Image (spheres, rainbow, N blue to C red):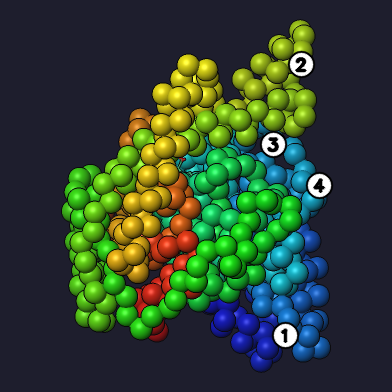
Amino acid sequence: MKTITQLRQQFIEGDETPVGALADTMKVINEKDTEIHAFLDVYDDAKEVAESATEAFGKKDYESKPLLGVPIAVKNNILVKGKRATGASRILENYIASYDATIIEKLKAAGAVIVGSTNLDEFAMGGSTETSAFGPTKNPHDTSRVPGGSSGGSAAAVAMGAVPIAIGTDTGGSIRQPASYCGLVGIKPTYGAVSRFGLMAMGSSLDQAGVLANSVADAEVVLNVMKGQDESDMTTVSSDTYPEVPVKETYTIGVPRSFLKDGIDRDVMERFEAHLESLKKDGHKIVDIELPLFEAGLAAYYIVMPAEVSSNLARYDGIRYGVRKEGEDLLDTYLESRAQGFGPEAKRRILLGTYVLSSGYYDAYYGKAEAVRTLMREELSQVFSNVDLVITPTAPTPAFKLGEKEDPLSMYRQDIFTVPVNLTGVPAMSLPMEEVEREGKMLPVGVQYIAPHNGEARLFDIGKKVFDDRQA
Ligand code: GLN
């Protein structure tokens, strides 16, 4: 798959056109997506957008549009005006978005050709795309395995070669973990760097949209288009909210050793150690650090997140939004609509969240989890006074088999390294390491770099050094 930079070069030189690039995208979708099921909808009107982009290149009118003619796919929990926005839930099966999310407005203004929407775990709740009401997505590297989740459709769309770029959302790892399982670059920005206006809220204090790509440089171009303060989202930050995080020649990189002790596959750990060695060879300094509270990350996340989920999903009641199942009276209509509209994982989290927020339990669970979160943030900022970046594997294993993780807790454990990042609001990026072998197939695994708040430029810098430049 060509990178955006390569595509743009070809568009400018006339060796390729946006119409041609879109035709390539459609060809891959037609050939592969019956099996992979990365897409929920493919947009017919993408053709008109590609045609006008082709014309614009003809007139040399492309300077102000960094994504002109670039085909991209968007996770289906992000609103695109006039298109189905399902959240991969039965309850929104026929819901049509009445406006564009701020990030969609920005992508369109930059000239992107949105080719379709991608599959996800229901309302982004899951780590495998198996909780989608419309059936799972498969991993293009091995179709007996999951692509990860919840942005599994976006990851698979890029990994199968349909699009160079896809947009995902990340509440506890949903961009980075599928990037790891599908061999891609995946970035979750600083909380507030990108507007959440027009995103279906899962955990509002944790959610961020970000990018899945084949190269760090591509992810950077797209994130730069999407980011920025938005008057429709009060939680967005401006460029001077956090101190500047400078880019350096070489970095001091902290490894939270005691956090990496159990549950990681041996060969994943070997790839990680080899990656650390390669960093040392390049002149970076690797030091051991302690982040004891990170071990409480999963426990805190699985209280804070469902609490926010239970509140955010209250709006899907068959009256204000969602498919309505008429009952005998109003209460019955609510109960029936929600009972039939939500899948088991959504129900589990609504119940959990309602429980931890109920009077009598609020202080014991929700209050404690929020307190842990504050302490984690302090602990991390202490660490960042001594190191430039923190590094971990992205996930403890490569992609698992479809149906393998029936026990929800075993699925939740895949997020052990990613959730502390959302709880503390810092940016992080997953990059592919050397692959590992399972049953004769080579499977990707990722390494996660974590930077201080506002440290995206630093992530892109190290990412280009250790990934893009080594690929070239
Ligand atoms: N897998 C995590 C969960 O199930 C993260 C989901 C996400 O980031 N949207 O909550």
Q: Please provide percent x and percent y for residue 44.
A: 76, 59
Q: CA distance from mark 2 to mark 4?
A: 25 Å
Residue at 77%, 9% in the rendered image: 329
Residue where numbered disc 2 is placed: 326
Q: CA distance from mark 1 to mark 2?
A: 54 Å
- Local packing at callout 1 (Cα closer than 10 Å; few below 14, some 14-19, many 20+) is few
How many other residues sit within 10 Å of disc 4, few (<14), some (14-19) or many (≥20)? some
For residue 100, side relative to residue 264 (left or right): right
Closer-to-camera residue (331/51):
331
Looking at the picture, tell me which residue is in the foreground, 132 or 460: 460
Type of amino acid under label 1: Glu
Q: Quadrant of the C terminus?
A: bottom left
Residue at mark 3 to residue at mark 4: CA–CA distance: 15 Å
Q: Nearer the viewer, residue 459 or 78?
A: 459
Residue 368 vs 188, above or below: the answer is above
Q: Which residue is mark 3?
A: 93
Q: Residue at x 61, y 59 (%)?
A: 237
